[in-house]
Structure formats: C-alpha cells, structure tokens
Image: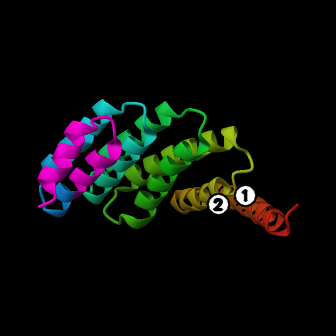
Amino acid sequence: ALEPLVRRMIQLEPSDPANYFALAKIYEDAGAYDQGEQVLQRAKVARPNDPAVYLQLAGYYNRQGQFDKTIQALEERAAKEPNNPEASYTIATYYWDKSYRDARLTDNDKKAYVQKGIEAIDHALQIKPDYMEALIYKNLLLRLQANMVKDLATQQALIKQADQLRNKAQDLRKQKTSGD
C-alpha cells in the first residue's frame, strides 16, 4: 500500500505540496472523500500562498460535484495571484462550463453564473487585453447571455459584441501564427 509511504513523505517534507496531492488522490481513488479533502486542506495550511494547492482543491471539489466550493477555491487562488489573468480566466471557464452544461440549473442561477463569469473574464482582460483565450470565453459567455434575454435589440447587441470579440481573437491567432 502506498498510503503509509506517502504519509511518511509528508512527515519528512511537510512543505512539499506534491506529497499531499498524492495522498489526497489515493484517498479519492479509494472513495475516502472526506480524508482526501482533509489532506488537501492540510496542504493549504502548509502552503497557503501556493496557487497549485487551490487548483488541486478546485479540481477535487469539481470532481465531487461541489460547484460552490470549487469556485471558492478558485477565488482564493485568484486572491493569491491578483495580477495573473489566468486565475480570473479559469474562474470564468468554470462558470461558463456550469452554465452551458448543467441542465438542472434554474434560469436565475444560470443568469447569475453567466454574469459572474463575465465579471471574472473582464478582470482577466483588464490585466491582459490581448488574452486570446479570454476573448474567446467572453464571446461564449455573451452568447449564453444573449440566449437568456427576451429583448431582441439587447440580444442582437450581445451577439454583435460576441462577434467582435471572436474576430479579435481570430486576428490575434493569425498574428501569432504568422510571427508578427
């Protein structure tokens, strides 16, 4: 069994998050979810400023279907890296994915998640205006928002804005591939 070995490695190297991640995975694979979560929480105590710890926690919660805890871990990570656009971008991708794929969401929850996704992606784009992937996700979020709006003029305005973002992302991709 790997578990005792990995526990010993944590004792020897309590500040190395990789050992906590390995132990949490052993517990998760065995269906011992509470123990897996506890180990990841211990990693957070050991390495409170390590963004990887929060990403591991978010992934863990997401696999358990705990969306609120997933977002909380991602937001804690973003707070540790306020100037990293990828941290806010990641939050937005989770909101888009949940809004797009979870048919059980109420319309109000879906609207709220899309709005929070747009806020997160706007933050990423404030930090890095030419962030191609963020432009693509904002385009996707605006299209979801347009689908929820009854007013035709508002819907068309959102789709037009989404088209502009998509075109900007395509232009950036072309510049990248041509080496400009």
Q: Position of residue 62 (x, y in %)?
A: 32, 55
Q: Amino acid at mark 1?
A: Leu
Q: Amino acid at mark 2?
A: Ile
Task: Tell me what residue is drawn at x 42 percent, y 31 percent.
Answer: 49
Task: Tell me what residue is drawn at x 32 percent, y 50 percent.
Answer: 67
Q: Which residues are magenta?
A: 1-25
The reply to whether the magenta stretch includes residue 7 is yes
- 62 on left or right of 79: left
Q: Can you say whether 49 is above or below 38 in the image?
A: above
As drawn, which residue projects farthest toward the front? 12
Task: Tell me what residue is drawn at x 48 percent, y 57 percent.
Answer: 96
Instruction: Rate crowding at label 2 as few (under 14), some (14 to 19) or many (20 or more) other CA atoms within 10 Å.
Output: some
Q: Position of residue 37 (x, y in %)?
A: 21, 46
On the rendered image, what quadrant is the N terminus found in? bottom left
Secondary structure of the residue carrying numbered label 2:
helix
Question: What residue sits right under mark 2 in the picture?
Answer: 136
The reply to whether the magenta stretch includes residue 113 is no
Q: Can you say whether 30 is above or below 49 in the image?
A: below
Q: Position of residue 30 (x, y in %)?
A: 13, 62
Residue 33 seen from this side: no
Question: What residue sits right under mark 1 in the picture?
Answer: 165
Instruction: Rate crowding at label 1 as few (under 14), some (14 to 19) or many (20 or more) other CA atoms within 10 Å.
Output: many
